[in-house]
Image (tube, coloured by chain):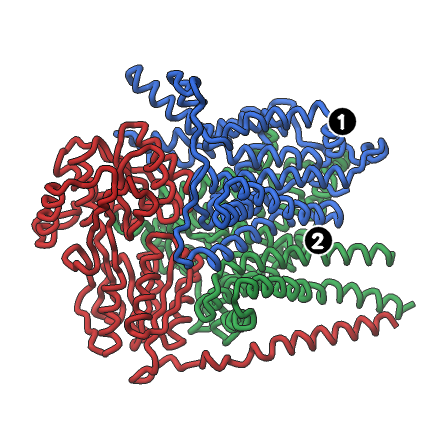
Amino acid sequence: MELLPALLFLQSTLAATWRMATPILYAAIGEVFSERAGVLNIGLEGIMLIGAFAAYSTAFETGNLVLGLIAAVLSGLVCGLVFALFTVTIKANQIVVGAAFNMIGMGITGFLYRAFYAESGKVLSLKTFLPLDLPFLSSIPFLGEVLFRHNIMVYATLLLVPAASFVLYKTAFGLSIRAVGEHPKAADTAGINVHRTRYISVLIGTSLAAIGGAFLVLAYADQFVEGIVTGRGFIALAVVVFGGWSPWGAMGTSLLFGVFYALQLRIQAMPNVLIPYQFLQALPYLATLLVLVGLTKRRVRAPKALGIPY
Amino acid sequence: MVWRNFGKRFRRAWQSIGLPPIAILIALLLGAVVLWLAGYDPLIAYRAMWQGAFKDLTAVTEVLIKATPLIFIGAGLAIAFRCSIWNIGAEGQFYLGAIAATAAGIYLGSLPRAILMPLVLLLGIAGGAMWGMLAGFLKNRFGANEVVTTIMLNYIAIFITGFLVTGPMIETKGLFPQTPRISENAWLPRFLPPTRLHLGFIIALLLAIILYILLFKTSIGYTIRAVGTNAEAARYAGINVQNNILLAMGISGGAAGLAGAVEVAAISYRLYQLISPGYGFDGIAVSLLVGNNPLGVIFSGILFGALRSGSEVMQMNARVPSVLVLMIQGMVVLSVVAFGVYRAVTMEKEE
Amino acid sequence: MKARIYLLIVLSIVLALLVACAPAATPAPEQPAEPTKPPEQPAKFKAGLLAPGPVNDGGWNQTAYEAFKRMEAELGAEISYVEVEMAPAAFEKAFRDFADQGYNFILGHGNEFTDAAIAVAPQYPNTFFFLSSSRFYDPNIPNLIGLNTDSSQPCYLFGYIAAKMGKGAGLIGGMEIPPIAEAFEGFTLGAHSVDPNFPVKITYIGNWTDTAAAKEAAISYVDGGADFLVGNADFANNGVYQAMVEKNVWGFSLFGDNTSKAPKNILANYILNYGEGLVEIAAEVQAGTFKPTSNIEFGLKHDKVMWITYNDGAANPVPEELRKEVEAIAEKIKAGEIKTLSSQK
């Protein structure tokens, strides 16, 4: 490959990487909080769908994207309350409840979309968040396209990750989250309200997952469709584990997944590529798996009380 | 004293038999509320659903046919979940089983029926078990979390299937991507004609019973459960935890693979890209719904089969989108969970 | 004492269940359990659709659903549809459920339903079964007919336009199945008839729902120098339209008029009015005159079923001379002088 086309290819791939990573990243950061407090939520996929639908219907009816985002957060909070009620208060198995949420999310959003939008004959598109070219910065060659021509919800991840990291590692609240996820009994003895901490962590998790879903309709595609999340909730779960349950790790892993996804789309489109496209489609998943296996010699392990009700 | 004991037993029996129907009723009621809010008549919808599932013998056998893969997968997952191995990968294991079975059914098609039929099923088991044990191996060898690896392996299995049916195994290039039909010698017999009820359903029932016995009446099952309850303690007690993890993944993967093989050998007779509508994920709920009891899976599998089967007729005759049934399934799980906790609490008080 | 209370509760629950189920168990009045053989003159013409995905997908499934709505409006047919669970076990049952209820016209909307239709059709000789995207015809099963809509023909025209007006084209498909692959082949042949080196690239995203992936695939084409985009991935097409708008490139929409999604960018629509074809067939079925001797193939020559429209509001509308050229090519396709698929002889 010559230099200029190679640079252009790289530029296009990297710009796509961040966009592709964003919805996964929102959900994963939330899940980091939830899992750090000891609550495994495999219902992310369903909750992202609910968030996407709430955001879409609100933004569509009001014409206001910010209201849509708020609606997504509210729907995430409602999901979180129910989830925490089951997993924290009545101590149900977290995997069961998560699995139920995935079904409910798919079922209810699909049903409501049909009932209220699909056959209404309306034009169903939204005006989405448009790319916000940052002055000066966006005209820097290469970097401008990669870093400074995204929409606001993509940029927001730059604030979200350090903020999440700060809360988790530098605040008393973050300390209680981690304590509750490691040794709930000891935390309880030390005067930390285990249930309250877990409730809050679950709520952070579900509302961020809902935002991740909302991103897909408010800032990526302009319309809700059934099953629009297409497995991103599951990917986010994987991202949390092999980002080592840390916000920065989650960001790195989401970007890694994003880069492989962007790459596979571009390799498929290259002329004279003889690899069957299904192998390219499998690439992000395979790469994630291999990297996970290669990296697990690290001394990172799951929160000790993960999955165990207290 | 005797009376007391009787009362307690009776209460226990009632709590495990009587509560699920109430949970289902609650879920249906919630579904009715959603239906009503969206402007449908819940009574008409549910009547159509009921008819779809139970109107006559054929309908009932169709429910059982739909339940068959769920029973296989659910019973297998019960073993993994009892070992505290969160195998989310039954979907991929189902695909691998279907691939192996199809390959055998096509390329070894000249073998006599008495050999080919069991061989297809065995290879299905092997395919699924291999895919499951791969995740087990990655966990043992590298400490890779099985939730993550099985999710990734699901995607990879589906893409492998896509590759095979659009490429090397395609029936006719340029036509619909599907493999040729497997040899008739591999077809599972159907009894009870004209319905499609097939041997696979009986095998599913047998498997559920066998896995129940394995789990609760043998030392193998005891060790698996011991590892699941507390891996550390089991290790101190001299149990080889890693081997048990591998075994649990092998059993659950093998059961899912068998489900895939049966689906090919009894229903579709060939493989194509989307041969599973998410059986692997439904299977998770089917197992968890009955507290990971392989025998209970028979009931929860049939329940989900009935809901699915009924929902299509609901869409046909009452014009209610069939996706709603997913929500009802989820609600059933949640309310069973809530009742399960209620049961545990009342029992605790009793002791 | 307590046990008796529990017994009472159990009994009342069982009773409640029985009561709840009782009305359901008796056949509903509006759904009389009709015998499998419908009478000679059916009271009402009934048409049932097996859709392989949501009927509101803005693509393949919606085409069929719209067609059925036309049958309802124009023939007074009673229509119904079911989005079949994509499991082979579900297909046969869905066909039977319709046939048992006396439906006269049952359409399996895709080639994947072929096996199931072959299994069911012979048992219901008075019901007509149809398969979309299929060239099935077997004189031994005269009541099962394949209906193929040859999307490669209009796509050939689009390929021609793209090669005349642009620098390169990117095609984004859901999965590699014949209706998609054939449409893309037609596009490629059309483009290469203008310029054999015109770059036409194809990506499959592997599903029908991931709008974000479709959008990224489209953007990657534009970044790679393409200025024409075509989406053929149902729901996920929204992402392609969005990429057209954001990157300000051109494109076409397939199966329906989607100009509203990218009013300045979509240059032409391929309209598939499946309803026109189905209504014609259904009318014959209804009148009892439908006696097919081959499969049915819809192409550009059925100009009420398949045609293309131009978007005059586009920022770069297809010029008048080019439209005339396209018209001439369309005539040749209709006459069979131009092949839009390499497999056509």
Depicted C279 relative to depicted B351: above or below: below
Residue annotated with mark 2: B216
Q: Give the residue at x 12% y 50%.
A: C330
Q: Which mark is residue A172?
A: 1
- Chain ID, mark 1: A
Q: Amino acid at mark 1?
A: Ala
Mark yes or no: residue B104 visible. Answer: no
Q: Is residue A209 above or below residue B114?
A: above
Which mark is nearer the camera, 1 or 2?
1
Question: Closer to the camera, A167 or A255?
Answer: A167
Q: Where does residue A197 sit, x and y in percent of width and height?
A: 75, 37
Q: Position of residue A220 (x, y in %)?
A: 44, 38
Please, which chain is the residue tagged with disc 2 on? B
Q: Colour of chain B?
A: green
Q: Is residue B201 left or right of residue A198?
A: left
Q: Element at badge 2? A: helix
- At label 2, the amino acid type is Phe
Q: Residue at x 57, y 49 (%)?
A: A102
Residue situated in front as seen by the camera: A34 or C72: C72
User: Is B78 or A198 nearer to us in this picture?
Assistant: A198
Q: Residue furthest bottom?
A: C40
Q: Which quadrant holds residue A177? A: top right
Residue B88's x, y, as percent?
56, 44
Query: Left of A250 or right of it: where is B111?
Result: left
The chain that appears blue in the image is A
Residue at image coords 29%, 84%: C40
The reply to whether the C-beta atoms of the residues labelled 1 and 2 are less than 8 Å apart is no
